[in-house]
Amino acid sequence: MYRWDGGFIMVDPEKFEEAVKWYQEVLGWVCLDKITSWVGRKGFMKLPRSGIVTIKSFEGIYEHLQSSDAEGNVKLVFVTYDLDKTLNYLVMKNVKSTEISVLPNGQRYCEIFAFNNTKLTIVEEQRIEDNNDYPASGIIGFGNVNAIIHVKNPKVSAEWYEKNLGFEVLEVNEEAGFAHMRTEDAYDRNVLGQQFWDNIWLLQCTQNSVEKPNDTKARTYFDIRPSVFFEEYNKLIRNGIKPSEIAGDPINGWGGFHIYDPDNNRINIWSYVAN
C-alpha cells in the first residue's frame, strides 16, 4: 500500500527565502529548519495543529524536481475549522480564492492563491474537543481529507488506484460522479506503528480534465518504505506504467519519483530513512 504522507510546496529558487517568510507571516506556520542538500533547498514548516509540510525549491538535475507548464488536478489539502473566517482573513492579506464547493460528504472547500499564486486547497472540518488557540489564518494543518483528485471517470480511476497503489475503495457513485477512497497515514504507520486512515476523493470533472502530463506546485506525496522501493517501482513498470527517473537515494536518504494516472494527473511518490 502507498500511504499518504503530506507533500512539498514548490517555489522558484530565487524566491525560496521569501516564500518561507510569507508562510510564516501570512499563514502563521513555523519554520523548524532550513537545509540545503544535493536535491536543493528545503524549509520544514510546522503546521499549527499537526503535520509538517516542506517548502522545496525547483532545483537539482532531476526531472522530478523541476517545474511543469501544465496545471494539474491533484490537490494537496489543508484544513480550517471555519472556512468563512479564514477567507475573510485572507482577503485582508490580499490573498484571492475560488468559489466554495462542497464534497459529497458535505464538507466545504475551495482553493486559495498563496505565495506566487500557488494553489492550496482548504477544506472545512468540524471542530471537536480542540480548545487550542491558532494563528489568525485558521489554516491549521492536515485533516480528515488529504487529497482531492479530479478525473473523467471515478469508477475507472478508483480501480486504477486500487490496483496500482493499493488504495481501498469505500464507495463509488457513478450517478453523483465521485469515488471515495482511503489509504493509511504514513506517519502513523512508519513512526507510531499505528493504523490511521486518510481520505481521498475522486471527483468527476470533464471540463477541467488535463490532456497532457501535468503537475501542481503544491504536490501531494505518497510513501513507500525503502525495503520495497525498487520492488514497487518495477511493479509499476510491469503494470504498464512509466515512472519517472528516481531522484535522490531512497535507501540511504530521500528518494522520489512520479507517475501519471489515466487522466494525466501526476502522483508523487517518495521514500526516506525514518529517524
Image (spheres, grey):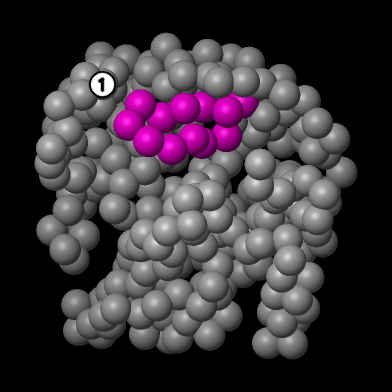
Question: Would you say residue 103 sits in the magenta stretch?
Answer: no
Q: Quadrant of residue 229?
A: bottom right
Q: Residues within 10 Å of mark 1 (few under 14, many from 20)?
A: some
For the point 66% across and 62% down, which residue is it?
A: 225
Vertical relation: 184 (above or below) 217: below
Question: Would you say residue 50 sits in the magenta stretch?
Answer: yes
Q: Answer left or right for 89 relative to 111.
A: left
Identify residue for label 1.
134
Vertical relation: 36 (above or below) 233: above
Vertical relation: 167 (above or below) 73: below
The quarter of the picture where the C terminus appears is top right
Give the percent coordinates (x, y) of residue 52. 49, 35
Could you tell me the amino acid type at mark 1? Tyr
Toward the viewer: 213 or 273?
273
Toward the viewer: 149 or 2?
2
For the point 42% across and 22% down, which residue is it?
A: 29
